[in-house]
Amino acid sequence: MDPLARRTLGRTDVQLTQLGFGSAGLGDLYTVLPEAEAAATVAAAWDAGIRYFDTAPWYGRGQAEHRVGRALHAQPRAEFVLSTKVGRTLHPVHRAEAFARGMWAGGLPFQERFDYSYDGVMRSFEDSLQRLGLPRIDLLLIHDLDLQYHARMERVAALLGELYTGGWRALSELKQAGLIRGIGAGINELGMMPRFLDLIDLDFFLVALPYTLLEQGVLDAEFPRCAAAGVGIVIGGVFASGILATGAVAGAKHNYADATPEALAKVARMEAVCRRHGVPLPAAALQFPLGHPLVASVIPGAIAPQHVTRNVAAFRHDIPADLWAELKQEGLLRADAPTPG
């Protein structure tokens, strides 16, 4: 599969390279990344021909946006597509030495506040432009409005109301003014796509985790709803947060937690099928989502140039149709899951 071929995202006029670049790791996710390594990683993606880059204020509390912007500012702006996110505003911590950084081992000393209001979305957009140091953002996504981050459905409903009465107007104005080219929402769990589609007129979803070699529950109702509405899809967590890249090894992560024995056993069986066909498991994981006609791009992360090189090679690896057929025959992949080719 050609990583540099382009697909149109939903009903927008935006064309994405089939292989994009996710920048959560540039925010010092779990480990501190030296500046030179961050710059070299984005440069490796550019040199490989990748032209879609995704970031967010949340990644390292501004760190990833700074790094992506510095790496791309000298490149011709018309040649790449850039997406970032709204839903959090960042506020300085004046006693940074006591700041609890959480999942971001490094990152910047800013406290995040969820804000889906009109003013919150406009501030987030303008702050992102400043951090990126770039004149334009192509795609803007509503970030982390789900149970994973807000715990109670009542809280989710209240924030959806804030979005509907405020933030959505800001996003619509930005698009109508030509300041962005598409509006999306990031999805971490089943059940949220219909809630968004019932509320607002989105162009696409960035789907993290619910559509991988391990999980295809979105095929039941959510992807059909998207197809009916002309809504496109970008796939974020293509490796299910690790296990589909590492395989069934000790300490493997699945959906940001230690993999269960059931997940490890299933992935071990997938690896056996892949070996029979001479295909690395990461290659199958990267290419599988693009079998669905709604999917425009997959955006694995990377924190070293060799990660980018490895992803590009895996994306180019030829996969015989018999591999997908055997995965289905073994009950490891849904029979109705569309596959590449």
Image (cartoon, rainbow, N blue to C red):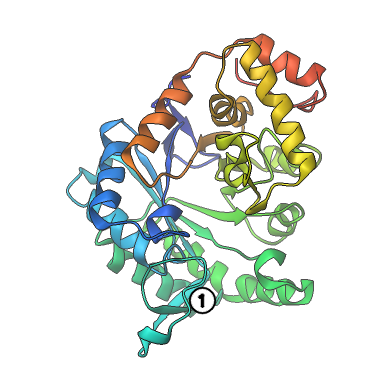
Residue occupying image coordinates x 56% and y 17%: 279
Total numbered labels: 1
**Percent position of residue 302, x then y:** 41, 44
| Residue that carries the numbered disc 1 in the rendered image | 118
Q: In which quarter of the image is residue 136?
A: bottom left
The residue nearer to you, when weighing 248 against 78, is 248
Side of 33 relative to 269 (left or right): left
Side of 172 relative to 27 (left or right): right
Q: In this view, does 88 lie above or below 222?
A: below
Q: Is residue 215 visible?
A: no
The residue nearer to you, when weighing 280 against 75, is 280
Q: Can residue 112 be seen in this view?
A: yes
Residue occupying image coordinates x 50% and y 62%: 172
| Residue type, label 1 | Tyr
Quadrant (top left, top right, bottom left, bottom right) of the C terminus = top right
**Percent position of residue 307, x then y:** 39, 37
Residue occupying image coordinates x 59% and y 26%: 281
**Percent position of residue 197, x then y:** 70, 54
Residue occupying image coordinates x 64% and y 46%: 209
Q: Residues within 10 Å of mark 1 (few under 14, many from 20)?
A: some
Side of 29 relative to 154 (left or right): left
Side of 69 relative to 285 (left or right): left
Q: Quadrant of residue 285?
A: top right
- Most extreme residue toward the left is 74
**Percent position of residue 1, x then y:** 48, 19
Secondary element type, mark 1: helix
